[in-house]
Amino acid sequence: MGFFIVLAIHLSMWLLTLPAHLLDFLGLWEPLAMRLFPHLYAKVSLDYHALMHSYKKKLFSRLPDFTGPSGPLKVLEIGCGPGCNFLFYPEGTKVTCTDANPHFQEYLRKSQAENDHLHFQSNLVAPAENLSEVDDASVDVVVSTGVLCSVNSVEKALKEVLRILKPGGAFFFMEHVCADPSTWTYIFQKIYDPSWKCVFAGCNLCRETWKDLEKAPFSEMKLQHIRAPLPLRPTAPHIIGYAIK
Ligand SMILES: C[S@@+](CC[C@H](N)C(=O)[O-])C[C@H]1O[C@@H](n2cnc3c(N)ncnc32)[C@H](O)[C@@H]1O
């Protein structure tokens, strides 16, 4: 019985997103999804940000610990999207914003105008896997929230993070990840994943991102697995923490 319910959900997900799958097959979906996603994200992420506020506040309270001796704190955010993390950065932080999708710029500029306690250095349209415009060992902190689920290569993105971080600098992350395989959440992640990727511009529900972080040559890591208090259960399993170069 359980098998047929799962199959029925799988088929209905595919049917609901059939036009997107067809456009994807023709190679037309990705450019359209890039344009549509920022508007969709602006709407659907409001609840997410409210529900995750206290987790982010606690995580980012550690940011000042990584300010270099010459100060102020220099942060580079990968996949910063509309800039929902700026309110957590300490007064006077120098921020470099990067994202692979140029269509977030309108939302990003609005958020930058609202966060005049920060000094915005530049807005780079660049994938996290190739930040060649950023110098080696040039930032105190790199931030990634909800991004490693979407990059093409987590390994390459982390290599870039380690390259641009100063020695002793930190990579702050909060990412939704693959659930424990013994849970229903895992089964639903597997069911929703193909359609989810289509609708949410390449977002993978089943990434074991903590394994990539553990493999990367950071000197120290504080990583916590949490079940986020979200109504959308496939994105509830999260990792949160920071890794020091
Ligand atoms: C779910 S949104 C999260 C946005 C923001 N970090 C937040 O927490 O609200 C995912 C973001 O990752 C960006 N992204 C996807 N693939 C990327 C890549 N390869 N390099 C950099 N950014 C990427 C998307 O354009 C989008 O802005």
Image: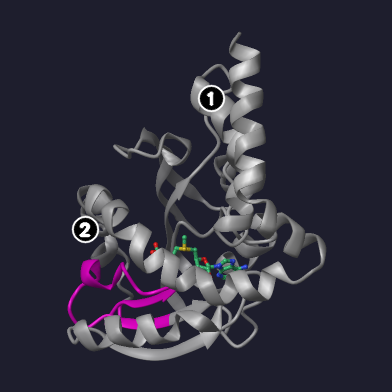
In this rendering, position of residue 231 left or right of residue 64: right
On the question of residue 85 being in view, the answer is yes
Q: Quadrant of residue 68?
A: bottom left
The label number, if any, that marks residue 180 in the structure image: 1
Q: Quadrant of residue 127?
A: bottom right
Instruction: Name which residue lies at 58% across and 80% down.
Output: 136
Question: What kind of secondary structure does the magenta stretch mostly adopt?
Answer: loop
Up/down of 80 relative to 102, above or below: above
Instruction: Decide if residue 126 is on the left or right side of residue 144.
Output: right
Q: Nearer the viewer, residue 106 or 15?
A: 15
Assess disc 1: are there few (<14), some (14-19) or many (≥20) residues with their C-alpha within 10 Å of its C-alpha: few
Horizontal side, residue 159 vs residue 87: left or right = right
Answer yes or no: is residue 78 visible: no
Q: Secondary structure at mark 2?
A: loop
In the image, residue 77 lies at what x, y percent? Answer: 44, 72
Tell me the kind of residue under disc 2.
Ser
> Pointer 1 and pointer 2: residues touching (CB < 8 Å)?
no
- The relative height of residue 5 versus residue 49 in the rendered view (above or below) is above
* Quadrant including the N terminus: top right
- Element at label 1: loop
Callout 2 crowding tier (Cα within 10 Å): few <14, some 14–19, many ≥20? few
In the rendering, at what x and y percent does residue 28 appear? 74, 72
Q: From the viewer's side, name the closer residue of 54 and 7.
A: 7
Q: Which residues are magenta?
A: 69-96
Residue indicated by mark 2: 61
Q: Residue at x 43, y 91 (%)?
A: 122
Q: Residue at x 46, y 72 (%)?
A: 38
